[in-house]
Image (spheres, helix red, strand yellow):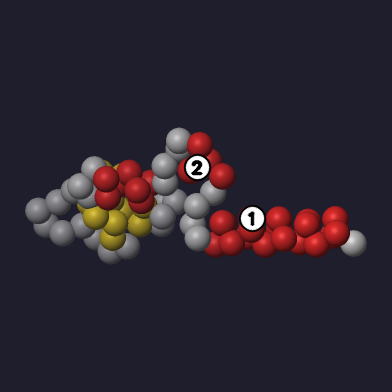
Amino acid sequence: MRTSYLLLFTLCLVLCDMASGNTFLTGFGRRSDHYNCVKGGGQCLYSACPINTKVQGTCYRGKAKCCK
């Protein structure tokens, strides 16, 4: 009985971690593309980049553009 509760608790922790947008790889030194964009002075946009900026990469796993 304790084992099933432990497994359920572990599953809940994993699902909560995935829902926050982080995965196991981000904790081991690989940062998300959104983090890298903002850290480098960029801005994540779903629409086209403003006139005075250009696309430097992607954000949100390729769903948005990183504009600098």
Residue at the (24%, 55%) spot, across then down: 43
Q: Which residue occupies the foreground of this view, 6 or 56?
A: 6
In the displayed structure image, the side of residue 63 where residue 13 appears, left or right = right
Q: Which residue occupies the foreground of this view, 51 or 34?
A: 34
Residue at the (32%, 44%) spot, across then down: 36
In the displayed structure image, the side of residue 60 where residue 46 appears, left or right = left
Pointer 2: what residue?
27
Q: Amino acid at mark 2?
A: Gly
Q: Amino acid at mark 1?
A: Val
Residue at the (42%, 42%) spot, across then down: 31
Q: Secondary structure at mark 2?
A: helix
Residue 16: give x, y in percent of width and height. Answer: 59, 62
Residue 15: give x, y in percent of width and height. Answer: 63, 60
Residue 56: give x, y in percent of width and height. Answer: 25, 44
Q: Which residue occupies the foreground of this view, 22 or 51?
A: 22
Pointer 1: what residue?
14
Name the quadrant containing residue 9.
bottom right
Question: Callout 2: 10 Å neighbours few (<14), some, many (20+)?
Answer: few
Image quarter (top left, top right, bottom left or bottom right) of the N terminus? bottom right
In the displayed structure image, the side of residue 30 where residue 17 appears, left or right = right
- Tell me if residue 39 comes above or below residue 10 in the rendering: above
Residue at the extreme left:
52
Q: Secondary structure at mark 1?
A: helix
Q: CA distance from mark 2 to mark 1?
A: 13 Å
Name the quadrant containing residue 7.
bottom right
Residue at the extreme front:
2
Res 55 visible: no
Res 12 visible: yes
